[in-house]
Image (tube, rainbow, N blue to C red):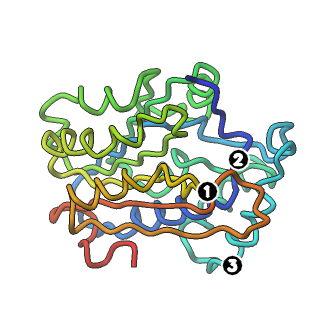
Amino acid sequence: MLSYQHSYHAGNLVDAHKHARLAEMLVARPADAPTLAYYETHAGRGLYDLSSKEAKKTGEAKMGAPVIAALPKSHPYRQCIAQTQKRYGPRFYPGSPLIAQHLLHRQDTIQLFELHPQEHAALRTAMPHDRVQIEKADGYAGMLSLPTEQAARNGLLLIDPSYELKNEYADMAPWLQQLLRRSPNLSVLLWYPILKSGLHEPMRKALMQAFPTSPYEEVPFPADSGLRMLGSGLWQYTPLSSLESPQQALT
């Protein structure tokens, strides 16, 4: 299924939660840390116009705006938004690829997977830089296909699926176990929706069983949010050699 397009949801309460955490993880890295490889399994288009017909149809960015504005001006997430708006105009919002590009070091690398044809094409336009590798491919398979030397590097992976396929919930923990055996120095930030149906709960329990020291955080949304979910969840895996210790994560 390739129907999901994030243009309808950019800048909403979900983005305010996951993008703030992503920015915090990226700046938590020590200044003298080794080169980092950044990955995304579902990259989207990278840059979003909040005045587009898609964004106006849902109006979800209006709910996210006050949450973002409540963060300190010095917060790296707000700095990324300010830089994006300075470059493209006040109606634009940075997706996670642009946030990462702004906060990563010059020597770091970025590899993005996006399977949706239109999103992939827009992503290439938004990220025309030599150090960015963009693949029109399934991100789950792509991460497991990394060359052995690359898989062993220090890295950070954002997993941000639309969960259009219900088997993604059941497959997530086994896939992550397989991936982290190949990539032991990889940090992971996984987003998931909090659903009234509870469809996310077995996945969360499986992750807790497979990775008992890895924290998760769930943020409830107001009843009038208009979103088809009760809240936003983030699960984080951090190896000892990576950005921050498990004790510092998702407090």
| Label 2: few (<14), some (14–19) or many (≥20) C-alpha neighbours in 10 Å | many
Disc 3 from disc 1: Cα separation: 14 Å
Q: Residue at x 44, y 61 (%)?
A: 234
Disc 2: which residue? 9
Label 1 secondary element? helix
For the residues bearing labels 1 and 2, Cβ distance under 8 angstroms: yes
Which quadrant of the figure has residue 31? Answer: bottom left
| Label 1: few (<14), some (14–19) or many (≥20) C-alpha neighbours in 10 Å | many
The disc placed on residue 245 is none
Q: Position of residue 205 (x, y in %)?
A: 32, 58
**Mark 1 vs 2, N-terminal side:** 2
The disc placed on residue 15 is 1
Which quadrant of the figure has residue 82? Answer: bottom right
Image position of 41 with respect to 226: above or below = above
Q: Position of residue 183 (x, y in %)?
A: 17, 43
Q: Amino acid at mark 3?
A: Ala
The disc placed on residue 70 is 3
